[in-house]
């Protein structure tokens, strides 16, 4: 197993940026581009100190050349590759050309300063990408390689790719869980931070679900595999990470196209300045070349090009640490413009697990008979896999009541279930008995009240006589109302889409506080509603967890899937995944993406303003090359640092 387990066992979240500032500074210095930039700066300073009043000597020139080479090699190579493979110009070649031009007319130090600051800004951007990549994919280092498989009474080491559904694996204390599965024996606390972002270990025992890449605590667990290696939640996260690191938002694609055209214009203007200015009275070729080099430096769009991706990557990284996984920067940009958030009901706004809310005895039940009735009901429903049946069994179990063993238990198609015990026939099923004319008016009224609260009502019968009325409802998530309120405070409309009955939808929708309720919807109806909301309000985020939500997730501007209990189809289609199903994170995520968009706008305005002022200064006030270098490259560093702020935002 992997040597890093002791650290992980202590509960450190793999999404954590690294903790103390000293660790971040160490990572900053260890960045290769940063080392090259700092080396270039040191050589530049040494060469300047060794220069005389008349200018740099041979030793200084050699040191300057080394500074150029160390600081500019990476950018020169990138620029040449772009020129050769894409037949295009970029800012890298413009900066290298400007530095070489400065050296050609004797401004060795200015050229070296340009290389140093340009390399420094590039290293900062590289560090941003590296930090974001580490924050998102720290969990990749937790990928298990082998497992202990139990087969025919023997324990064997196998690669995780060899595990198959229904295999039984043993996980020792402190080891990585090698596959998605269900605990069949043992009890332990499992650190799920790599999957859900939860900071505290979660207690696991028989029947509980566990995930690949999570870390077992102090007890041994025996787990039945439920997913093959390629179908695990862990594998899906890896795919998301790979996608997030490659796809860029529309604004960045526009800047890339703009950079290409703008670079050509800068080169043409630079050549014209060199060729035409000497023809004017009072202009020498040397003065013209110097002016052209200053223009080449200050007009290059370095800061503009760096205005977007560091911001997007910082936002993606920030949200990953909170269990919100973006598949690409495109969705950060789209989510910032959210006007409506549409929730599926079951499993999204609600827990997805129906619970018994009311157990009412009729006059036909004998005094003190409630526990016996519960035991009979649990015995009837124990053989059924229906969610309402599971709710009744759970209700009985929570009260410490063991189910009775009934005879001749059978399902009644379209109604419920029946069985015999102690000489009586017992049934649990739909409440249609209360629709008959002879039904007790008081119980008809009670049923109507319960159904108005969004509850499903069933009856328990003894020899065709009603003895109990059972109300069951899928309860709201504890954080649902707060999540809705937070979205509304941001000026966002909140809708709920469900295939459930209107009465149930109204009860749940009003309890959650949503603005729009749409009930009785098939999957295609949900798509139609999403399209209506987009036409009426603008950008729509759809939040869902089931297979039936997949079409609506795809139709929305941004599809947001529930990562813990969401179906494979929903996770595949979703653009963003809530790894711990924390819907309370949605408002915070939208707030952060809006902030990211604001920072991008700030960066672009700032970059364009600086470029414009420097160009004007060059022609109107004979801007010195060192000031042009500092102004232009300083603005690039500032926009990158401005984007880095999002790494620490909440």
Image (tube, helix red, strand yellow):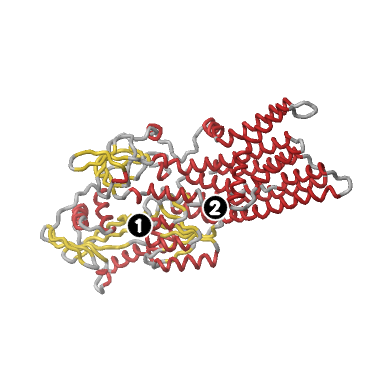
Query: In which quadrant of the rendered image does the N terminus lie?
Result: top left
Element at label 2: loop
Residue wearing tag 2 = 248
The number of numbered badges drawn on the structure is 2
Which quadrant would residue 334 be assigned to in this image? bottom right
Residue shown at the point (63%, 38%) measured from the top left: 72
- Does residue 349 show up? no
Residue shown at the point (56%, 41%) measured from the top left: 128
Distance from disc 2 to disc 1, alpha carbons, whole Å, reads: 40 Å
Q: Which is nearer the N-term, disc 2 or disc 1?
A: 2
Residue shown at the point (76%, 35%) measured from the top left: 106
Which quadrant would residue 339 be assigned to in this image? bottom right
Question: What mark, if any, has residue 53 been given in the picture?
Answer: none
Horizontal arrangement in the rendering, residue 436 relative to residue 259 (left or right): left
Horizontal arrangement in the rendering, residue 241 relative to residue 53 (left or right): left
Residue wearing tag 1 = 474
């Amino acid at each position: 197993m992997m040597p890093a387990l002791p650290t992980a066992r202590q509960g450190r979240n793999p999404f954590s940026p690294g903790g103390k500032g000293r660790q971040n500074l160490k990572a900053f210095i260890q960045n290769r581009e940063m080392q090259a930039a700092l080396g270039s700066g040191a050589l530049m300073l040494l060469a300047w100190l060794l220069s005389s009043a008349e200018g740099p000597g041979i030793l200084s020139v050699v040191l300057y050349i080394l500074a150029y080479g160390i600081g500019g090699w990476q950018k020169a190579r990138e620029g040449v590759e772009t020129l050769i493979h894409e037949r295009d110009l970029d800012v890298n070649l413009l900066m290298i050309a400007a530095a070489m031009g400065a050296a050609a007319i004797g401004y060795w130090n200015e050229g070296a300063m340009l290389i140093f600051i340009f390399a420094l800004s590039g290293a900062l951007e590289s560090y941003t990408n590296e930090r974001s990549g580490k924050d998102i994919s720290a969990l990749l280092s937790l990928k298990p390689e082998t497992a202990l498989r139990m087969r025919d009474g023997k324990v064997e080491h196998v690669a995780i790719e060899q595990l198959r559904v229904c295999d039984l694996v043993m996980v020792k204390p402190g080891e990585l869980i090698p596959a998605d599965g269900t605990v069949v024996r043992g009890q332990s606390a499992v650190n799920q931070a790599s999957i859900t972002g939860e900071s505290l270990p979660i207690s696991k025992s028989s029947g509980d679900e566990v995930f690949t890449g999570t870390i077992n605590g102090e007890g041994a667990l025996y787990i039945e595999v439920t997913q093959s290696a390629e179908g695990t939640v862990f594998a899906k996260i890896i795919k998301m990470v790979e996608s997030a690191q490659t796809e860029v938002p529309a604004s960045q694609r526009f800047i890339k196209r703009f950079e290409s055209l703008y670079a050509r214009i800068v080169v043409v203007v630079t050549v014209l300045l060199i060729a035409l200015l000497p023809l004017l009275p009072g202009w020498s070729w040397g003065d013209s070349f110097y002016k052209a080099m200053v223009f080449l430096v200050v007009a290059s769009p370095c800061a503009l090009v760096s205005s977007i991706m560091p911001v997007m990557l910082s936002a993606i990284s920030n949200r990953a640490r909170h269990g919100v996984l973006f598949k690409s920067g495109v969705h950060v940009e789209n989510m910032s413009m959210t006007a409506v958030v549409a929730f599926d009901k079951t499993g999204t706004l609600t827990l997805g697990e129906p619970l018994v809310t009311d157990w009412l005895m009729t006059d036909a039940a004998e005094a003190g008979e409630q526990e016996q009735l519960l035991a009979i009901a649990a015995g009837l429903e124990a053989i059924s896999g229906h969610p309402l049946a599971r709710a009744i069994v759970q209700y009985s179990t929570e009260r410490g009541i063991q189910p009775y063993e009934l005879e001749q238990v059978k399902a009644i198609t379209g109604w419920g279930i029946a069985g015999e015990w102690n000489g009586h026939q017992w049934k649990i099923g739909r409440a249609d008995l209360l629709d008959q004319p002879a039904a007790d008016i008081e119980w008809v009224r009670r049923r109507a009240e319960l159904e108005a609260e969004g509850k499903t009502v069933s009856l328990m019968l003894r020899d065709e006589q009603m003895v109990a009325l059972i109300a069951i409802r899928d309860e709201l998530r504890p954080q649902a109302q707060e999540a809705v309120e937070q979205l509304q405070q941001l000026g966002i409309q909140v809708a709920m889409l469900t295939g459930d009955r209107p009465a149930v939808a109204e009860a749940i929708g009003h309890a959650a506080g949503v603005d729009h309720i749409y009930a009785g919807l098939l999957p295609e109806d949900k798509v139609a509603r999403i399209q209506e909301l987009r036409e009426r309000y603008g950008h729509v985020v759809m939040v869902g967890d089931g297979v039936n939500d997949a079409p609506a997730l795809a139709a929305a501007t941004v599809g947001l899937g529930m990562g813990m209990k969401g179906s494979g189809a929903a996770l595949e289609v979703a653009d963003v995944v809530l790894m711990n199903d924390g819907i309370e994170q949605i408002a915070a995520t939208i707030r952060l993406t809006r902030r990211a968009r604001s920072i991008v706008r700030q960066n672009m305005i700032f970059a364009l303003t600086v470029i414009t002022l420097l160009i004007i200064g060059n022609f109107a006030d004979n801007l010195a090359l060192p000031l042009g270098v500092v102004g232009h490259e300083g603005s690039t560093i500032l926009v990158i640092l401005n984007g880095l702020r999002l790494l620490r935002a909440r």
